[in-house]
């Protein structure tokens, strides 16, 4: 089996310091988290920026630039910029950060009802972001919240907006999207081309079991406070603890951990 790529998603859009003191908000906090998580076995870092004053999601180019610059200086991690956005954020606000030319960026290929909002991704927005990524040589990670989003991603490849092989991230267990179960994961995996790679993000308590299933199935794993702020019931986690636990689980399962350069080879980056 191929080595395991561990992605850390340390910040996301939701948890604030009042929810957990361990969530990195400021650029230097995110950079420090990246250094610690690389030591524990992460090879990709999925980043969001937050406004320093109120911790809300930010589209500020300068903040993304500071985070990317620091991570490049201090780590070998593959930087994956989130192109997600809150309701009301349009294409222009979500595409600006791609000018930083990270090696990867996330691309959600459909819309989904989050518990309290609509995560809207219109066909025009998806294609616009895909075009930018292609132009800048950025590999998209297809964020799949439901089965139809796999087909939408395959259509982008058919229209030559995305290069193959495609890399997917199955986000499972979010209320309003596909449930976190082995049946659903097997079904999703069976929908993707045989040369595609996939990662799994389980939301909340689903993080650990869904990552374990993915490891067993030859997939990759995403952990971090974006998806779950707890290590176990009632105990808040740090990002590096979550990376260490999944790396240890993989070793127990005789699955080797990919270094950032292994991950570049597996994902075909830098070609
Ligand atoms: Zn994200």
Image (tube, rainbow, N blue to C red):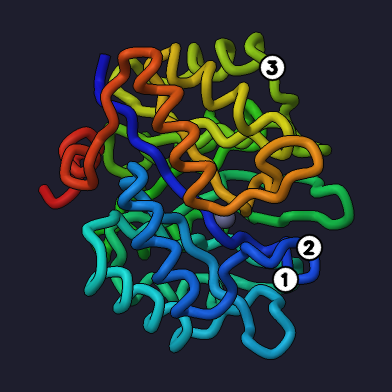
Q: As rendered, which of 104 and 242 lies closer to the eye?
A: 242
The mark found on residue 181 in the picture is 3
Residue wearing tag 1:
17
Q: Does mark 3 have its CB less than 8 Å from ligand 1?
A: no
SS for tag 1? loop
Residues under labels 2 and 1: Cα distance? 5 Å
SS for tag 2? loop
> As drawn, is 266 to the left or to the right of 139?
left
Which quarter of the figure has residue 201? top right
Q: Residue at x 58, y 62 (%)?
A: 11
Q: Residue at x 44, y 39 (%)?
A: 244
Residue lying farthest right?
A: 116
User: From the viewer's perspective, is the residue at label 1 or at label 3 nearer?
Assistant: 1
Ranked by sequence position, the earlier of labels 1 and 3 is 1
Q: Crowding at label 3, few (<14), some or many (≥20) Cα neighbours within 10 Å? A: some
SS for tag 3? loop
Please state the horizontal and vertical placement of residue 4, each as a whole percent of the image: 33, 28
Residues under labels 3 and 2: Cα distance? 27 Å
Ranked by sequence position, the earlier of labels 3 and 2 is 2
């Amino acid at each position: 089996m191929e080595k395991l790529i561990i992605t850390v998603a340390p910040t996301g859009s939701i948890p604030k310091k009042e929810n957990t003191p361990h969530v990195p908000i400021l650029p230097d906090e995110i950079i420090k988290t990246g250094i610690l998580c690389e030591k524990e076995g992460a090879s990709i870092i999925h980043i969001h920026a937050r406004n320093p004053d109120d911790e809300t999601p930010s589209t500020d180019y300068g903040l993304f630039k500071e985070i990317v610059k620091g991570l490049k200086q201090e780590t070998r991690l593959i930087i994956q910029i989130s192109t997600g956005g809150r309701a009301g954020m349009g294409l222009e606000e979500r595409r600006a950060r791609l000018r930083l030319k990270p090696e990867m960026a996330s691309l959600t290929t459909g819309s989904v009802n989050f518990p309290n909002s609509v995560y809207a991704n219109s066909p025009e927005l998806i294609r616009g972001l895909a075009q930018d990524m292609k132009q800048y040589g950025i590999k998209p990670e297809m964020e799949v919240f439901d089965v139809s989003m796999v087909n939408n991603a395959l259509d982008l490849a058919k229209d030559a907006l995305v290069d193959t092989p495609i890399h997917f991230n199955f986000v499972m267990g979010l209320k309003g999207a596909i449930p976190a179960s082995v049946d659903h994961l097997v079904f999703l995996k069976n929908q993707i081309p045989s040369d595609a790679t996939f990662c799994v993000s389980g939301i909340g308590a689903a993080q650990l079991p869904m990552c374990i299933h993915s490891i067993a199935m030859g997939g990759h794993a995403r952990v971090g406070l974006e998806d779950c702020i707890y290590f176990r019931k009632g105990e808040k986690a740090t990002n590096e603890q979550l990376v260490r636990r999944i790396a240890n689980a993989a070793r127990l399962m005789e699955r080797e951990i990919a270094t950032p350069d292994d991950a570049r080879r597996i994902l075909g980056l830098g070609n």
